[in-house]
Image (cartoon, grey):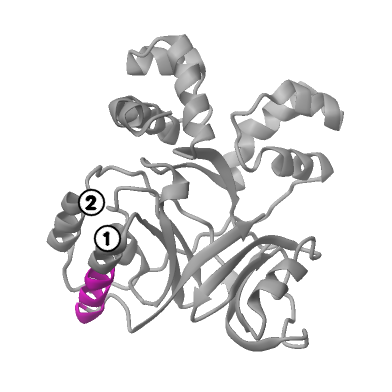
Amino acid sequence: MSRISNEKRLPKYYRLYDQIYDNPSIPLHQLTKNTGIARSTVSRYLREMHEHSILKGPMIFLLPAQNYHEHISLLKFDHPVKAYERFRGFPHLMYRSLCSGEWHLLLICSTLMNFSALKGVEACVLQEVKGATYLPKVTVHDWDLSMEQMRTEMAHPEEKSYLYEETSWNSWKEKEWTLYHQFKHNIRIQAVPILKKCQIRYEHYQKWMLTLTDFARIYPAFYPKGLKHYFLFDFLFKSDYQNQLVDILRLLPSTAVFFSAGAYLFARLAVLDRKEKDDLLSLIFQLGENGYFTEFHQAMVISTSE
């Protein structure tokens, strides 16, 4: 798909994303009715959006619970690339990123792991309980406008707030966990072939879907130019005003990813070029001057794997 055709279709792409964000399991006929786009075109556009990583998901992000917590570790290694490859298939590892900056590896595990004894570890920058992942809806479509709005919204925060959210108890059994692992990257994929493969009845799947938001949050991600065209930067803010910080940074014109990690707020933000990176860093310095955080750390994402 050419860049010109992408630009022409972008308003319709956004309308589809907007509907899916509000209702991740919305059926095709309802998408057609709500957007005014023909059903066959809706199917084609959704396929194109996924093929070009304009749309990701909708994805399932588990809530912490009394009996379930994920842990984030930010580590420095003497040989980062070798370490990143070594973690392929590591027990309890849910996600890993190779980075360049104040840490080399970002690891998310379903249990607390002691990485200090591993060969090549130079330092543990952070190890904390990870909060629920939050992907705000993209509402601004122009970079310069987003910068202007963020500066307009900026004030001196007063009331402390934290992004952390927890459900009381995760009661999932084997079948529910199987469904999660099958659908976690996109709940809209065809269910029947997966249910046949996993030998799970459709009624069980329906019940799981109806109660899913008791245990998880579901979000699509939207990257208007296609994810491969963006540079991703991870930021770690030590902040007592996490929600206020999110309210500012959520105004970027592509999906931003947030979660809490103890006293820190983690943010993964996307930029297209050097100008946008410089604009973003300037804004972040201004946020620090206005008291939104007391320290911040950063790294650029080189590779990710789940």
Q: Quadrant of the C terminus?
A: bottom right
158 vs 128, nearest the viewer? 128
- Residue at x 54%, y 79% (from the top left corner): 103
Q: CA distance from mark 1 to mark 2?
A: 8 Å
Q: Position of residue 128 (x, y in %)?
A: 59, 76
Q: Secondary structure at mark 2?
A: helix
50 over 75 or under it: above or below: above
208 over 73 or under it: above or below: above
Q: Amino acid at mark 1?
A: Glu
Which residue is disc 1 drawn over? 276
18 over 268 or under it: above or below: above
Which residue is disc 2 drawn over? 143
174 vs 40, nearest the viewer? 40
- Apparent side of residue 182 relative to residue 256 in the rendered image (left or right): right
Highlighted range, magenta? 281-290
- Residue at x 35%, y 48% (from the top left corner): 254
CB within 8 Å, label 1 to label 2: yes
